[in-house]
Image (cartoon, rainbow, N blue to C red):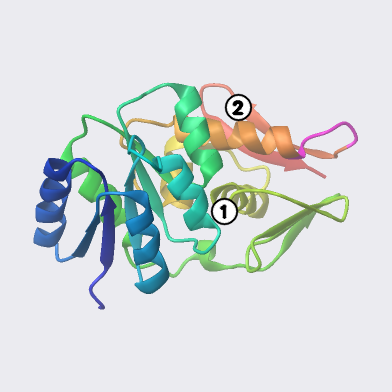
Amino acid sequence: MDEKKILVVDDDENICRLLKMYLANEGFQVLVAYEGSVALEYVEKEKIDLIILDVMMPVMDGWDVCKAIRKISEVPIIMLTARDMLEDKLQGFEAGADDYVVKPFETKELVARVKARLRDKREDDEDDKTPVSIDNLTVDLGRYQVTLDKKVVDLKPKEIQLLHFLLRHRDTVFSREQLLERVWGYTYFGDTRTVDVHVKRLREKLEKPGNRWHIKTVWGVGYKLEGE
């Protein structure tokens, strides 16, 4: 297997040094950038497999860096922040982040998330990218495109993946932990609000009167997409 290349972006040299040591011990090749502009240069010139990106950086903060990266790459991005407010997480996901880790964090947990996200894909039905439809909604995972009433809807990559999974398994209830594992690719680490945030965004962007489908909350369990 090719050595995976991780880019750590943080203006704190101690955090960069710590993460580089732990990740290198796990067999990853690690690049470090202390500011956003340098990170963007790496993304343009190197084949990066995953980015660990700090939010609070001078000149160009992590949210702006994330947005800029998303214009040229779909590389997985794990954002680091000292703020645990829901609004901050929403902003991170809107910018295109795949995961969100709050400082102070357990280094072993962060490394586990990295390893899980980069693990070889299992040969199962999640790899099927055949377009799926229900009523006025079509999700084409191969093109990362969603259409509602034949109009393309602007969704983030992880929102599209979650919608595709729920639609392929319509009328089946999944817990938040199951969705984290099946869609995000890592096991439950304690913050299932990631799923709630993405479901909230999907409802805001897609659900409207007249739809013959909807994403239903099954209280005490999780979510399912149901419809005709």
- The picture places residue 4, in percent across and down from the top left corner, at 26, 69
Around disc 1, counting alpha carbons within 10 Å, would you say few (fewer than 14), some (14 to 19), or many (20 or more)? Answer: some
Going 9% across and 60% down the picture, which residue do you hit? 25
41 vs 153: above or below: below
Element type where label 1 sits in the image: helix
Judging depth in this view, the residue of 167 and 5 nearest the camera is: 5
Element type where label 2 sits in the image: strand
Q: Is residue 195 left or right of residue 214?
A: left
Secondary structure, magenta segment, majority class: loop
Going 44% across and 48% down the picture, which residue do you hit? 65
Residue holding disc 1: 157
Q: Find the magenta span and give its range.
A: 206-210
Q: Does label 2 or label 1 sit earlier along the sequence? A: 1
Residue 209 magenta: yes
Q: Are marks 2 and 1 in contact (CB under 8 Å)?
A: no
Going 46% across and 41% down the picture, which residue do you hit? 63
Judging depth in this view, the residue of 141 and 157 nearest the camera is: 157
Q: Can residue 29 be seen in this view?
A: yes
Residue 97 magenta: no
User: Separation of disc 2 and disc 1 at Cα?
Assistant: 24 Å
Residue holding disc 2: 218
